[in-house]
Image (cartoon, rainbow, N blue to C red):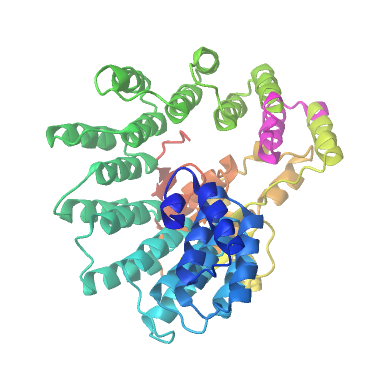
Amino acid sequence: MIRAYSLSNFPEEGFKLYREMRNRGITPDPLSSSFVTKSCIRMSSLLGGLQVHAKILEDGHQSDSLLLTTLMNFYSSCQKFDDACKVFDEMPQRDTVAWNVLISCYTRNGRTRDALGVFDMMESKRCGSQPDDVTCLLVLQACSNLGALEFGGRVHSYIREHGFGNAVNLCNSLIAMYSRCGCVDKAYQVFKGMPSKDVISWSAMISGLASHGHGREAIEAFWEMQRMGVAPDDQTFTGVLCACSHSGLVDEGWMFFDCMSKEFSVTPNVHHYGCMVDLLGRAGLLEQAYQLILSMRVRPDAAMWRTLLGACRIYGHVSLGECVIEHLIELKAQEAGDYVLLLNTYSSVGNWEKVIEVRKLMKEKEIQTTPGCSTIELTGVIHEFLVDDISHPRKNEIYEMLDEIGKQLKIAGYVAEVTSELHDLGSEEKESSLSYHSEKLAMAFGVLATPPGTTIRVAKNLRTCVDCHNFAKVLSGVYNRVVIIRDRTRFHHFREGRCSCNDYW
């Protein structure tokens, strides 16, 4: 009965039965404790789970690996990652499931490099458990988050060697991983080689094409999906609308938005409206985007207002930007990034008084901004850079290389885009402050540490600024390198002085 309740919509009843069982003097066995722990996971009850854990120790079941694995899952689901790792460390025997839960803990906690390290241990058989299909799924997700293409390729080889290659869910994860690591061609190879494709496969491929700026190809994939008789779902339309947005296809976007409910019975949700706001905002149709938000049947979320705020920054629409901030304050959802976008908007029109005012407000409210962080993978090792970073062991060589690159790019016509600097400084000071952004350091390291002609792949946690975008364009031409940067919203493929986004991002 406890197990049945743990799987139902009433997990709290399972906890009540467990308590009644103990009150009647019946000592639970490890299975009973495992099922009530699952009830606590469903209830998101940290206190309940802690009480069960105490009773597990009292009952002497701290050596049961299956039960301890469930406890790990409980602590992980409650964001108590250190406690989950502690349970793992205390396990007398660990099977593949336990190692998989540890990988999941690391991934949820943002320790993705540690997750990759666990796969290394399992593959080398040092831990006594081999990776299974679930391990591969979890590690592919970690590779996607880190942009770890080489490591993802290793996992792909492992999948093929161990006979998992035809599993649809693994193929779908490989499509997503290759797409998010900047290798949409390899994603397409996996897609084409699948013996059967479900709606998730098609949606992943459409989204991959969209994020790389292949809007027309993404739309063609949608129509091919129809010819194959696969019905689209809400995720498919999110991908198609993103494709329209990233490629500036306003008319096509409206067509898909209108037909999704009329022809395919898919009701637009907040994500679809968000894509339309993004599409209209990128195209400069800001008032139209604002009216669309006001006309929505669903309540707009903070992400949608931030999308419009980003468009206000691009087009310097100060009054609408201030209006959007008011909506975010009303939702009690304003974040540091919102104020940075507003700062960008004010600085783009040279309103330094407002910039100072917003900075003062941020200081009073103790609002901390997210630092820009860029990563680059070389020979399976992830190298991380922050702005003005001096932590890398080869920092002196990197800064010398970056200065040399800067000199060569200036000869080729590169001029720093000083509007990307948010402080009221002189032009030389602004140029200097822009010189050591995290993605520039990562690119310089890529030029320094790889042979000529090698593709440089960088992943950044924030939207790349205009100056770094221009820098990467000129670098790709001067150094004859393909540079691929994944920022928060899309991929930029720089080749021969041009970008795949056509400066539309």
- Give the answer, above or below, for where 203 lies relative to 190: above
* Residue displayed at 79% across by 32% down: 358
Q: Which quarter of the rendered picture does the N terminus lie within?
A: bottom left
Q: Classify residue 135 by image quadrant.
A: bottom left
Which region is colored magenta?
330-353
Q: Where's residue 28, x and y in %?
A: 52, 68
- Residue 126 in the magenta stretch? The answer is no
At x 28%, y 55%, the residue is 169
Q: Say which of 14 and 361 sits in front.
A: 14
**In the depicted structure, whether residue 82 falls above or below residue 496:** below
Q: Is residue 346 above or below residue 10?
A: above
The residue nearer to you, when weighing 289 against 303, is: 303
Q: Is residue 350 magenta?
A: yes
- Horizontal and vertical percent for residue 204? 31, 45
Left or right side of 277 for 130: left
Whether residue 400 is visible, yes or no, is no
Q: Relative to residue 352, is residue 248 drawn left or right?
A: left
Q: Nearer the viewer, residue 286 or 194?
A: 194
Q: Residue at x 31, y 66 (%)?
A: 133
Q: x, y percentage for residue 92?
A: 51, 84
Q: Residue furthest front?
A: 24
Is residue 301 among the parts visible in the rendering? yes
Q: Main secondary structure of the magenta part?
A: helix
When the figure is inspected, residue 490 is found, relative to residue 180, above or below; the finding is above
Answer with the quarter of the image where residue 88 lies: bottom right
Q: Is residue 286 left or right of residue 213?
A: right
